Amino acid sequence: MYIVPLAWLYVALMMAVVEANHPNGTLLGAIITFALYGLGPVALVVYLMGAPARRRVIKAREAADRVKMTDDASFQPDAGSHATTDAITPVREKP
């Protein structure tokens, strides 16, 4: 899965080496070449390739939380003996 990004990083690294060793090239140019042709695109591609796996993990976590909530014996909504409304009763105004 990661062979193509690694190969592209190798190509970008070789481009940066050529840029640094060229008589008109600079080390700063080599660093920029490697960052813009290598690290940036590879990071974007790897992030996009991992999106389905992240989505699958999120759905599995949500499903596990739903199962945990329904299987939990202490999860009883409004099953307590307390009142469901405010403790202060509203005062009726005189007509």
Image (cartoon, helix red, strand yellow):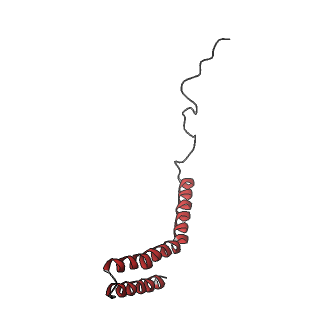
Q: Quadrant of residue 14?
A: bottom left
Whether residue 91 sits left or right of residue 14 in the image: it is right
> Looking at this rendering, what residue extends furthest in the right direction?
95
53 relative to 74, above or below: below
Q: Quadrant of residue 95?
A: top right
Residue 56: x percent and y percent?
55, 68
Residue 58: x percent and y percent?
53, 63
52 relative to 19, above or below: above
> Looking at this rendering, what residue extends furthest in the top direction?
95
> Looking at this rendering, what residue extends furthest in the front direction?
24
Measuring 54% from the left and 53% from the top, which residue is drawn there?
A: 69
In depth, the one of 33 and 71 nearer the eye is 33
Measuring 36% from the left and 88% from the top, which residue is drawn there?
A: 18
> How many numbered dots are placed on residues in this image?
0
22 relative to 32, above or below: below
In depth, the one of 75 and 52 nearer the eye is 52
In depth, the one of 14 and 4 nearer the eye is 14
Residue 80: x percent and y percent?
54, 38
Residue 71: x percent and y percent?
55, 55
Measuring 55% from the left and 67% from the top, which residue is drawn there?
A: 55
Measuring 63% from the left and 14% from the top, which residue is drawn there?
A: 93
In depth, the one of 90 and 37 nearer the eye is 37
